[in-house]
Amino acid sequence: MTQDLDQADDVLQIRYTFPMINHQTRRIASIALITSALVLGGCASSEQQANTTTSAERLYNTAKRALNQGDFLTAVDTFETLGARFPFGSYTQQAQLDIAYAYFKQDEYDNAITSADRFIKLYPRSENVDYAVYIKGVAHFARGGSFMERIFPRDMASVNQNWLRAAFAEFDSLVRQYPDSEYVPDSLARMEFLRNEMARHELKTAKFYYQRGAMVAAINRVGYLLEHFDGSKHVPNALALMASAYGSLGQADMQNDTLRTLALTEPEHPALQN
């Protein structure tokens, strides 16, 4: 760096000490001046870039330390400061994911999803997009929970089903678009769980209608269950309820057809013994 500065000074001295040099000499001196200026500018740019990287790294490490210590508010604030000061770079890119995770840990699920969406929009070709989609899925999955869930587990069939459907859609998107992702096994397990819980919700609703004599409503609800949650462990009981509802309506043919389907699905079901 010092040698480059001295070279630039030498060029400047020649230019101003010999103002009446001939055309060829002037051309050579001009080329030397431009070359030296570019070298000097490159050194300054490299130094500035190094300082920027160091500052971004320092902010990121501070935020990451707060995140690891459970100080999520400080972590989010510091990550956002990093993004505001240094909108480009690997540290800022990683910070966007860390912000989503920090919001998730604070049970701020809307903010977690928004942050993950922002990452996907800003870095659509990133190798970490699958993690952003996964964060969105688990954020929807966790809605309605609290610290009391460890003592009194949630009845997932009773929570807002829109949350469960949104979670299922995110996990399904991850599995389809990123089949080699390390988050696929957990996503598949959650999808199976969600399918059963959403089916159980529909079955509970169908039973509610059945017990109040609304047989058509009960049948329609079971039909929705069979259409959207085929393969769920609640399908046999749903078919049994549908058969009983058809029997109450005096529709023997529909009842027998439903029982035959039940026999193919679960031959030992108690409803078939009657």
Image (tube, rainbow, N blue to C red):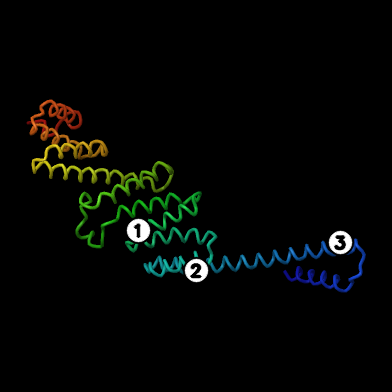
**Left or right of 9: which side holds 149?**
left
Q: Which mark is residue 27?
A: 3
- Where residue 106 sits, quadrant-wise, is bottom left
Question: Mark 3 or mark 2: which comes first in sequence?
Answer: 3
Dot 3 amino acid type: Arg
Q: What residue type is disc 1 on? A: Asp
In percent of width and height, residue 54 lies at 56, 68
Q: Quadrant of residue 240?
A: top left
Up-down relation of residue 248 to residue 187 (above or below): above
- Residue 120 image offset from top left, x and y in percent: 45, 52
Q: Is residue 189 above or below residue 73?
A: above
The dot on residue 110 is 1
Q: Earlier in the sequence, mark 1 or mark 3?
A: 3
Q: CA distance from mark 1 to mark 3?
A: 64 Å
Q: Describe the element under mark 1 as helix, strand or loop.
A: helix
Q: Quadrant of the C terminus?
A: top left
**Secondary structure under the numbered disc 2 in the rendered image:** helix
Q: Amino acid at mark 2?
A: Leu
Q: Is residue 92 above or below residue 127?
A: below
Estimate how packed mark 1 is, as few (under 14), some (14 to 19) or many (20 or more) residues with alpha carbons within 10 Å: some
Identify the residue at horizontal 17%, vertical 38% (top origin): 238
Which residue is disc 2 drawn over?
Answer: 59
